[in-house]
Every structure is written in C-alpha cells, then in structure tokens.
Amino acid sequence: MQRPPNVIVFFTDQQRWDTTGIHGSPLDLSPNFDRLARAGTDVHYSITCQPVCGPARSCLQTGLYATETGCHRNGIALPRESRTLAHYFGDAGYDTAYIGKWHLADSGGGAVPQAQRGGYDYWLASNGLEFTSDAYDMVMYDKDDAAVKLPGYRVDAQADAMIRYIDGHQDKPFFLFSSFIEPHHQNHRDDYPPPVGYYERYRGRWLPPDLAALGGSAHQHWAGYCGMIKRLDEALGRLVDALISLDMLENTILLFTSDHGCHFKTRNAEYKRSPHDASVRVPTLLHGGPFTGGGRLSQLVSLIDLPPTLLAAAGIKPPPAMRGTSILPLLRGDAADWQREVFIQISESQVGRAIRTRRWLYAVSAPEKDGWNDSGSDHYIESELYDLLADPHQLDNRAGCPAHREAAAVLRARLLRRMVAAGEAAPEISPAPARDCGYQLRVDGAEGWL
C-alpha cells in the first residue's frame, strides 16, 4: 500500500499574479514556478477571498470565510476552537508543521502562544514576521517561545528551515505550511528590500499596464518587489531540488499561492484592500499526485477552494462545513456545475463585497461603516463595475453608467446569492448614482454573457 503523499504549502505574501511568466511577465522572475505549473496544474484564474493578510490566512487555514472565523481584519486571533488544516491532516496521521508568518494571534508581532497555533505540531514562526525580522535579520520563535535567529537573506533562511524539516521527516507523511513574508513591504520603512544586487536587475524595467497607467508608488518600489520575487522563485527551485535528492518529489503534493496581490497605492492609500485584480488575483499552482499533468484550468478558483482541494488530494474527506469546493473534478473534465464567479469580502480600508466573473468585476461598499470595526453591513452601494472584455486592466469604472444597468442588476443578484451562501444576511444594495459614461454596451442576448 502506497504511503499517503506529503503536502507542502509554499505561501507568499502580497504577490501579484502577473509577476509570473505563465501570466505574461517578460522579466523572467519565475522560471521554477512556470516549470512546475506547466508540469502540474496551473490555476490560471486564482482569486483570493479576502485581500488582507490575516483574514486571508484564516480562510486558508479553516476553509471558512473571514466573517465566519471572526478574523475579518488583522489583529484578531483565530478562535481556539477553530478546526484548521493542521487538525484535519493530524487526525489522518500526518505530522504537521508551520514555518514563517502566522498573523492569526493577538500576541503582537512575535511569539505565538501555544493555544493560538492552530494545532500545528512543529512550530517556527512569528505572528507578524515583518515586525520581528528584516531582509538580513531573520528572527522567528520556536515551540518554546525562544527567539531563533537564522542566517542569510530572509527568504533563504526560511527555505533552509523548510529543507531541514523535510530532511528530518522522511519516515512519516507530513503537512508543512510555510508562509513567507516576501514580497510584502517592510513596514517600518515602507520599502521592498531585495537581496543585495537584485534591485539593479529590475530598475527601469517593464511595468504591468495598470501600474504604468496609474503610477502610485510602483516606480519607487517595483524593482525591489521583483527582486524579492526572483529570490522566492530560486528558493522554490532549491526546495524541489531537495525533494528530488531525497527521492520525495514523486510522493509530495506542492501548493504555491499567495494571500493577495499588490496595487502600489494606485487604488487606495496603501497596497491592497480593494476588489481590483491587482489586489485579488494571485499566482497558484499545484504539483504532484493528481495535479501532475493537470494543465491550465480556465475556471475561476477561490482561495477558499484550496483547503478542500488539499484534503481531497491526500485522500482525506473535506468536512461539510468548508465553504469551498475541491478542484479535483476539474482535472477530470467535470466542470458542468463549477462556479461562474468567485466571492470576495474586503475589510479595513472599507466594508466591501465583490464578485469576479470571467468578464466582469462587480463591487459594493458600505460608506457608513468602518472597515476596521465592522465586519459587514445591511446596506451597500455599488462602487465598481469593470467590463474585463473591454477593459482588462480595470481602468474604466462603469458603475452608474445607464448602458450597464442591466449588467449591474444581474451581477447584483448574483452577489446577493453569494453573500447568503457565505453565511451573511442578505443586505440592501443600492445602484450607483447614474452618470453619463459615453459608449453603449452591446448585449447580444447570448446566454452566459455575464
């Protein structure tokens, strides 16, 4: 009988989907990611369900929306009774390990109390890794709350810790979740510190079209951001090399994904917390087990779909409470009942909700609510409507355009259904104030145009 597969999550922080070659970047930042995605499964339209660090992590750990875990913003501890991936894999006989940024405790930036570690056995982490480390000053905390300083550039130090764990756990299946801080900005100086020599490689290079059009802080920070991503990809390559050398790659499932993207202060006053693809679309691949040779998925997949996917791929039945759906049927070509949109909750900068379809991005906000203190509202107003067929970079907001009233009405109804399905009460959604928007939307009546 074959041993159950090992499962590794390689989780980055604030990484845009279009930093990878398979999504069109010409900068050669991700040759290892691209190779694994082509050999495995490229989740091409991967969307976070919450573009904020802590809330997104609560969703990925539990398979529940952030309004259900209670972690609707940063700084809220995951409830101690929460069932996480560590519990489900542990119950199935796996060793479980967490390395990196946790961001689901109420203990500040450093050590995480044992009761707030989500059930993981092995522990080497910081609650807020950006506050206990710097590019060349990597400090995390072990199971005894002792500070551990690791040598090297921060990405390399964490990758080394992963490899040491894998090397010491060859005799029993393990679930290893490693959450990097890169390419998140370094908070105390609002900068993106790459390895020495990497900033110069990407200074003055290609910018994604939305950043080229909108500016923000991209011209200041893009080169460092790219340097961080390049080193992450090199670490991914080293991890795979280690698995090959230990004869473990063939029996290891690898998930690479991110919590949210980065819009470089173009959509609001900081880097994320908006419904735009720059905030919500992330690079995602799965490799090994049933994902080898899976090809490119054209369906929309939410971060909330990844927990049941990992469990199912390991032969563990996902619990009914999880809101997402395993993507394994998509690999078998069974996409008849797959979702036509993904649902997004937004906090801190606003109380917002959105759906993303292949053609449309539709979003609402609750201006009378506070995004830090309020998790939801009974009244929203339409705030964004983008036709991604005509405007893939989301530069022309059509909310309130008379010609788009029909599209908005259909999308409004679909958003309401998704909010109720996520456990929220159905709110009132007011249309955006009417305005003159120029061109007319052509609707040919074909089924599925939305």
Image (tube, rainbow, N blue to C red):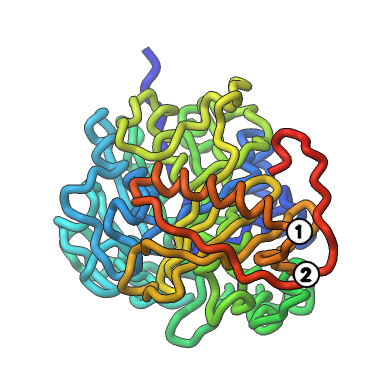
Q: Quadrant of residue 17?
A: bottom right
- Rounded to the nearest whole Å, what is the CA distance between mark 2 and mark 1? 8 Å
In the image, residue 73 above or below residue 56: below
- Residue 232 falls left or right of residue 130: right
Q: Which residue ends up furthest to the bottom in the rendered image?
A: 189
- Label 1: element kind: helix
Q: Which residue ends up furthest to the top in the rendered image?
A: 1
Question: At 82% across and 41% down in the image, what residue appears?
Answer: 444
Specify the label residue 253 is tagged with. none
Q: Is residue 149 visible?
A: no
Q: Amino acid at mark 2?
A: Cys
Q: Quadrant of residue 168?
A: top left
Q: Nearer the viewer, residue 250 or 417?
A: 417
- Label 2: element kind: loop
Reading the image, the residue beneath label 1 is: 403
Residue 440 position, x and y percent, is 83, 59
In the image, residue 115 above or below residue 186: above
Q: Is residue 181 visible?
A: yes
Of the residues under marks 2 and 1, which one precedes in the sequence? 1
- Residue 19 falls left or right of residue 323: right
Residue 130 position, x and y percent, is 40, 74
Does the residue at mark 2 contact the one at mark 1 (Cβ under 8 Å)? yes
- Residue 243 falls left or right of residue 335: left
Reading the image, the residue beneath label 2 is: 437
Quadrant of the drawing holding the C terminus: top right
